[in-house]
Image (cartoon, helix red, strand yellow):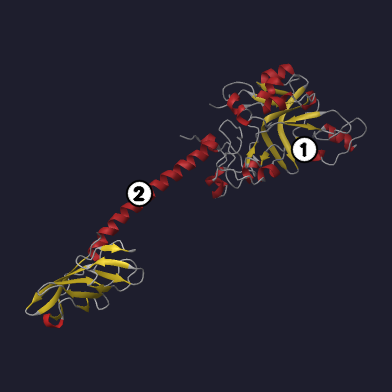
Amino acid sequence: MPVPAQNEFFIDPNRCIGCQACVQACSECETHKGYSMIHLDFVDRAHSVQTAPVVCMHCDSPTCAEVCPADAIKKTADGVVQTARKPRCIACNNCVLACPFGVPKMKTDFKLMMKCDMCYDRTSEGLKPMCATVCPSQALFFGTREQIESLRPRSIPTNQFRFGEQTITTKVNMMLPNAGKAEYVDVTKAMGVGTLGKTISLNILDGIYNEESAE
Amino acid sequence: MITREREQLTTSPDGGLLEDQPKWRQDFPIDWPQDHYVSRRDFTKFMVLTSLAFTAGQFWIVVQNYLRTRRGELPLIKIAAVDEVPIGGAVTFAYPEAHDSCLLLRTGEKTFIAFSQKCTHLSCAVVPQPDKGRFYCPCHEGSFDIATGAPIAGPPRRPLPKISVEVRSGAVYATGLELRTI
């Protein structure tokens, strides 16, 4: 059974409080018990407590699957990029190196790549993914677009990410400040940006923010 | 069946149409339904081609059966005159071809018996030992019964091929070859 099309995943790193509840919940799942498929990234640990949860973004053109030499990573018809097929995966690490979001994890003990599959056993049954269920601040939100729009009027979801010349469209949405009206998140612009005191400016939003910084 | 929309669910990195993509991209699709479709198609192709090969093989066997040369009846070859072989003695001869050496034994006044000389273990030449009632193979200490050619000791497990012999007007003739497994 496919994941219902109206149910979407929204990530709002702004709301993340770094409680690790999603990581714990993920690692308790029977399908990959003891191993969490979610990353809780510390944006700049030396200067800030800000964290950002990273789940699989489920790209329209999944780079992990494109680079897989063993044809092991497949996408179901509902757009969910599944974890590696165990009989096919050769543990070559190509997907781990290729994924722009750093999602796939290599379990060398199992000789298998394991990644977030949006809790396919749950979402295909109409339930929420485990991380979205437990997130106390709802930085990880799973629901319809109408719900998120009424709950977060000051944010707008986007699913366009810019890596240099390439724009990647994903199934999972990232919540951005409504004022920016950015077409896409420019991920590579954040690279090499230093921090100033307690302020973290990543310049990842195209549009007014960049123009302001340029001036 | 797979719908068109499903086939084009995954967009290629260059954003082009499915038709414009290289063939390997269609052979190794990222989409799960399309991947299953390809596996099914490969399996069906494999089954059809394999059955076809088996069918063709059967016909080839039939054709070969018509094409092969038949050996026909084995020749009738004179081995020796009756007087040349003493009772209890043996002579060597070749039957049916020049290199198939055989042994003819005279066991009585009018009884002759012949076996191939090739040991059924590793083709060494066997030596008749009438006093011990056996053919003896010196290579691996193999023994065959002198009356029947059956293996009685050592590594050989199959009996010696028997040559049927006939006495006609004072001479012994080899008339046929009897290959046996037990």
Of residues A130 and B143, the one nearer the viewer is B143
Q: Residue A189's quadrant in the figure?
A: top right
Q: Helix or strand or loop: what does disc 1 sit on?
A: loop
Near mark 1 (Cα within 10 A), the count class, few <14, some 14-19 or many ≥20, is: some
Of residues A43 and A46, the one nearer the viewer is A46
Q: How many marks?
A: 2
Chain on which label 2 sits: B
Q: Amino acid at mark 1?
A: Val
Q: Residue A118's quadrant in the figure?
A: top right
Of residues B98 and B42, the one nearer the viewer is B98
Q: Amino acid at mark 2?
A: Ser
Of all residues, the one furthest to the top in this rendering is A150
Label for residue B51?
2
Residue A171 in view here: yes
Q: Position of residue A204 (x, y in %)?
A: 80, 35
Q: Is residue B64 above or below residue A194?
A: below
Residue at image x 52%, y 46%? B27
Of all residues, the one furthest to the right in this rendering is A197
Q: Position of residue A3 (x, y in %)?
A: 58, 26
Of all residues, the one furthest to the front in this rendering is B131
Near mark 2 (Cα within 10 A), the count class, few <14, some 14-19 or many ≥20, is: few
Q: Same chain for marks 2 and 1?
A: no
